[in-house]
Each structure stands twice: as C-alpha cells, then as structure tokens.
Amino acid sequence: MTVITGAEVWNMIILLGILQGYILCALLYFSKKGNKTSNRLLATLILLMTLACTNLYMTEAWYAKSRVVRIIEQVFPFVMAMPMGPLIYFYIQSLITPDFTLTKEQKWHFSPVILDWVSTIAVWIFLAGLLMGFVQQEDGPRWGHFVDSYNTYSDIPRWLSITLYLVLAKRYLRQTITRNSDEAIQISAVQRKWIHLFLNSFLVFQGIWFIFLIPYIIPSTRGPLLDTMSYYPIYIPLAILIYGLGLKGYLYVHAIAVPSINKDSASPNGPHKLPVSTLSFSDAEVATYISMLKKSMEVDKLYLEPSLNVNAVSAHTGMAQKTVSFILNNHLNKSFNEFVNEYRVEEVKKRLLEKGNEHLTISGIALECGFNSQATFQRVFKNSTGITPKEYVSLQPQKLA
C-alpha cells in the first residue's frame, strides 16, 4: 500500500496552485474584457507568485531526483518579489482610474528587481568562471554559502517592499474615496468590495510571512524551522492566494463588463419604473438618454467642472446613476471618464488655437477646461490625439480668429 506523506500533500496543493496560476495569467493577459492595463498588471503579479511556487515545488519534489532541475533552479530567477509591491499599487490605481497607464517615472518602481537577481547572477558568474578557468570547483561551497545567505536575508527588503506598497495602496484608495474628483467617480460597490478583498488578503499573507520570517532570519532557529516545516507555511498560503485572488480577479473582470439596470431609472420627464425583465432599454429610450448626456456636455458644458462625477450628471439630467453608466458603457462604448474627457480635450484644442489666449499656459488652459491635474491632462490628451499638447500647437499653421 502506497503511503502519502504530508510533504506530498503540500506539494500537490502547491502544484494545483501553480497550474491554476499559469492558466489565469494567460486568461487575464489576453482577455478582451475590462481594463487591459488592469488585467495585465494582475496577470504579471500572479505570474511572479506562480514562479515562486514553481521554485519551491521543483526544490521539494524534484531537486534531489534530477540534475537538470537543480541546474534550472539555480540559473533562473524564479523568486522575484521586489516588483510585486509596485504591481499591487499600480493595479489598484488602474482599477480606480480607467485611463491609467504606467509612465516612465512609475516604471522605475520596478528597478529594485535587481535585488532578486543578485544570487542568480552570482551563480552565472561562478559557472562562467568554471568554464573559463578562473574559478575552481573547490570554490563551490564558498559561493554556495554566499547564495544561501543572500537568499535568506533578501527576504527582509522583499517583505518591507510589499508591505510599504500595500500601505500606499490603502492610503491611495482612502484618499480617492474621500476626495471629490473624477478619479473617484468610478468606484462602485463591486469595485470597492474587490479592492478591499484584494488588499486585505495580501495584508493577511504579509502577517503570515512576518511570523515565519522572524525565526527564519535568526541563524539558531533557521535550521530547526526548515527541518520541521520547510517553506510550506509561506508557500501554501501563497498558492491559495494565487487560486483565490486570480480566479476572483478574472471573474471580477467579467462581472463589471455587464452592468445591471437600476429599477428606479428615470425618464426625461421624471422618475418612473423601467421594465426589469431584460437588461436593455428600447431604442427610443437609448436615443433619449444619449441625447440628454450629450446636451449636458455640449450645451450645459458640465465637463468644465473639475469635480464632475456620475452623481452630478445624474442629478443634472434626472437619470439614475446606473442608467448613466449603462448607457455610456453599452451604447457609447465609453467609461464616464472617457466620455467627459473627450469634451475636455476638444475644449482645450479649441482654446489653444484661439487668439487672445497667448498669455495662458497650456496647463492653465487645461485646468480651465475641467482637468484637475497636469499629469492626467497630459496622459488623456496624448491618448486621444496621439501627440502631446505642445506638439499639437506646433503642428497648427496659425491661430484661429
């Protein structure tokens, strides 16, 4: 009779998390639903977690049995935890701000990944030295000791980095919710619930990791800890995190792609009950609602208000908030931010070419047209036109009369 050991059970759980992780990475990365930036940030985060679990599975299940596995485990940087904090932070931003894109400055947040590569680079140098003859095989234990020590103590900056970015993400969410700006208007109850679940799950994991990390970094307790439990106290929760958050993240993308209809949606003449047996409006109702939304921008120029949000448009037009979002998402194929910012960009383009505005800066004009920050304006303008505001002005033959 075959006896299944505890280690084999743990390895099976980790293996299932690994397989699920790679599948969810592919589904999220190539998904055409939801925010592409959000999907790819989450896919990359899950990929890094999955690679780390792959490293442990290879070590525990195959390391002693296969020389090839031992070589692969040493020469490939499976554990890359330093980018995970920034990925979490920017993922939350991308959920809150639909037009979010990573800037060059933000990409520098990922540069500490070099700390994850140090031990692998040391292995590459040792192997190259063996081939070239300036390192002897007898030096292997000394190099191995360095790699082991580095891998142990590098967990400290890894833990600190992820914890710091989780705190920053929590603060960003809190500030966005309390700040009345167009970065906060898209936070629905579903979004808020998912974001809190996502962040709190990682905070729980950080707590588990911290409990493990204390005896792990103390030389006198590290050996007994690993002999008794190996790294399973960290990687079992990590595998569960991959499966739980990866699956929920994928389902979330599909959930927000089909908004529900508010039973108390309103007509142009006042509130009334709309049919709730279907998830659609009649063509006449859709045309009326689109006309009302366009009038609120083109005639009433609500977009000039920097703090404009769905609530304000709802109150101005008499339409229910969910109706506003539904019409924009399903019939104009735009988010609220995209809809409003299109009008702001057109207003900026018009004012940039008007005579009499020469004394105004581009930033000043952008703020007058409803943008609440220079960074948001620059990003939205370039996404809309393909060029920067300065390039746009330089390409115009002359100012309009």
Image (cartoon, helix red, strand yellow):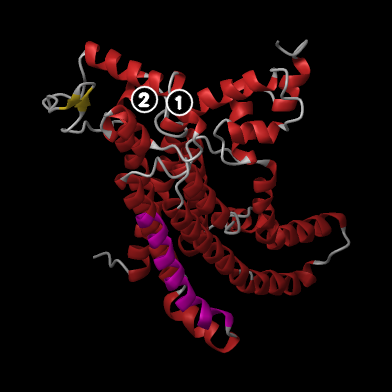
**Residue 257: % across, % down:** 33, 32
User: From this viewpoint, which residue is outermost toward the front?
Assistant: 356
Q: Is residue 15 visible?
A: no
**Residue 347: % across, % down:** 58, 22
Q: Residues within 10 Å of mark 2 (few under 14, many from 20)?
A: some
Judging by the rendered image, the residue that carries numbered circle 2 is 328
Residue segment shown in magenta? 196-217
Please, what is the three-letter code of the amino acid marked with disc 2?
Leu
Disc 1 vs disc 2: Cβ atoms closer than 8 Å? yes
**Which quarter of the picture shows residue 358?**
top right
Left or right position of 215 against 242: right
Q: Residue at x 20, y 21 (%)?
A: 269
The prevailing secondary structure element of the residues shown in magenta is: helix
**Which quarter of the picture shows residue 275?**
top left
Quarter of the N terminus within the rendering: bottom left
**Which quarter of the picture shows residue 119?**
bottom right
